Amino acid sequence: VTTFGSRVVCEASDTKDWARLRRAGDPSFLARIEAVPTADLAPCGLVALSMFTDSFVFYKSLSDSSDSWEKLEADESDVALPADATAYQKKIHGPSSGWSGLEIGGANSWLTPGSFYEHWKVWYRTPASPHVRNLWAVIRGGLSKGVYKVSFSENSPIWEDWGVPEKLIVISGKHSLGNKGALRCLGTVCLCLAGAEVLCVLLFAAFMPVRSTSSAGSYKLPEIRS
């Protein structure tokens, strides 16, 4: 499987026993692996097996004085980049007869069609920084002012076993220029560039030699005779 900037060549290199060792204490994830009727472990590798299988449900309070909550529809479809769909479509195929999961290179995989496959594609695009922030869902129409709560229908415990200090849910709005963090980063870069330009101007003005007009001599216009 070839993705943007990486090539996965670990097919048939891992076993279920290795996955059980890496994800010990995470029964939900192990259940997906054990559901595969064959001995195949696909997808394999540390990136695939480190995936969080978290699932959330969002609610909005109908009244400040009551305990009535309305479930919000979170759209988990098409959260991966369009380029990822092109990268995986030649290798990962839909369910065939006798198996409800996806197939990778002709082997049964623990990936299932739908939102879980979308989350896996997002997870598989590893970040350049040590901090991971993955798009999980989109709430169409945005969120109006009010009281909300988030319920974890599945909270993968593997992050605690690996010593990750915290796992956060970030709710951000959509903007034509990007999110708040991107704007802050872009503004910081622009300020640094502006400061560098000011410094260059000051250095140029301080060390530029000043030409004296007195030493240049006088210039005599040519005489024209008729």
Image (spheres, rainbow, N blue to C red):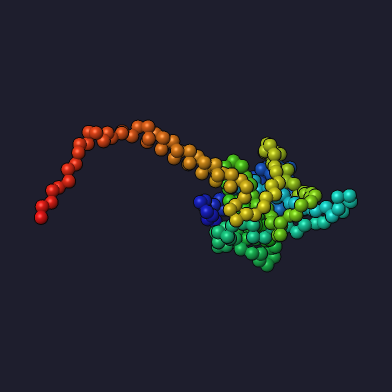
Residue 13 location (% of width, % of height): 57, 49
Q: Nearer the viewer, residue 164 or 9?
A: 164
Residue 149 shown left or right of residue 21 in the figure = right
Q: For the image shown, how many numbered marks are present on the structure?
A: 0
- Which residue occupies the extreme bottom position in the image? 97
Determine whether 22 is above or below 92 in the image. Answer: above
Residue for point 68% across, 37% down: 165
Task: Specify the quadrant of the image occupied by residue 160.
Answer: top right
Determine whether 211 is above or below 156 in the image. Answer: above
- Which residue occupies the extreme top position in the image? 206
- Which residue occupies the extreme right position in the image? 66
Residue 38 location (% of width, % of height): 67, 56
Residue 46 location (% of width, % of height): 60, 45
Residue for point 71% across, 46% down: 169
Residue 45 location (% of width, % of height): 59, 48
Residue for point 69% across, 56% down: 138
Q: Quadrant of the C terminus?
A: bottom left
Q: Nearer the viewer, residue 200 or 111?
A: 200
Task: Specify the quadrant of the image occupied by residue 70.
Answer: bottom right
Task: Please indicate, yes or no, whether residue 58 appears anywhere in the rendered image.
Answer: yes
Q: Quadrant of the N terminus?
A: bottom right
- Which residue occupies the extreme left position in the image? 226
Residue 22 shown left or right of residue 65 in the figure = left
Residue for point 62% across, 54% down: 175
Task: Specify the quadrant of the image occupied by residue 108.
Answer: bottom right
Q: Nearer the viewer, residue 106 or 29?
A: 29
Task: Please indicate, yes or no, whether residue 46 appears anywhere in the rendered image.
Answer: no
Determine whether 83 is above or below 54 in the image. Answer: below
Q: Nearer the viewer, residue 35 or 179?
A: 179
